[in-house]
Amino acid sequence: MARRQLDIKVRLERQEKKILKLSAELEEAKDTYEKLLEEQKEEDKKKLFEAYKKSKRSLDEVIDFMKGKADI
């Protein structure tokens, strides 16, 4: 019976280590995801600014358009 208790303790320790490892991997994956979202946001900003520079509209007109208030 003592052996069985030891087996369970060893298995529990292994599972705990596995959980800790996976938790660390999850945090790393979340950080990477956040960085990628930020990169995408920066690219979107650049595209929006380039479109604004090429347009004949004023900044206020563009903002109103984006808010859905424009009569363009």
Image (cartoon, helix red, strand yellow):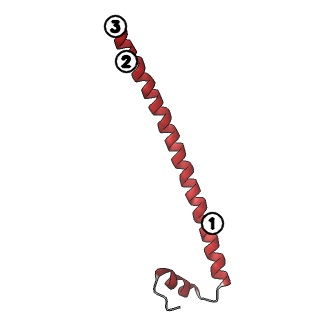
- For disc 3, the neighbor class at 10 Å (few under 14, some 14 to 19, many from 20) is few
Question: Nearer the N terminus, badge 1 or badge 2?
Answer: 2
Q: Are marks 2 and 3 in contact (CB under 8 Å)?
A: no
Question: Nearer the N terminus, badge 3 or badge 1?
Answer: 3
* Residue for badge 1: 43
In 3D space, how far apart are the residues under numbered discs 1 and 2 (Cα atoms)? 52 Å
* Residue for badge 2: 8
> Which amino acid type is shown beneath numbered disc 3?
Ala
Residue reaching furthest to the bottom: 71
* Residue for badge 3: 2
The residue sitting at 59% across, 62% down in the picture is 40
Q: Is residue 11 above or below residue 32?
A: above
> Which amino acid type is shown beneath numbered disc 1?
Glu
Residue reaching furthest to the left: 1
Q: Position of residue 58 (x, y in %)?
A: 59, 88
Q: Which numbered mark, 3 or 1, is in the foreground of this view?
A: 3
Q: Is residue 44 above or below residue 28?
A: below
- For disc 2, the neighbor class at 10 Å (few under 14, some 14 to 19, many from 20) is few
The residue sitting at 45% across, 32% down in the picture is 19
Q: Position of residue 17 (x, y in %)?
A: 46, 27
Secondary element at image label 3: helix
> Which amino acid type is shown beneath numbered disc 2?
Ile
Question: Nearer the N terminus, badge 2 or badge 3?
Answer: 3
Q: Quadrant of the N terminus?
A: top left
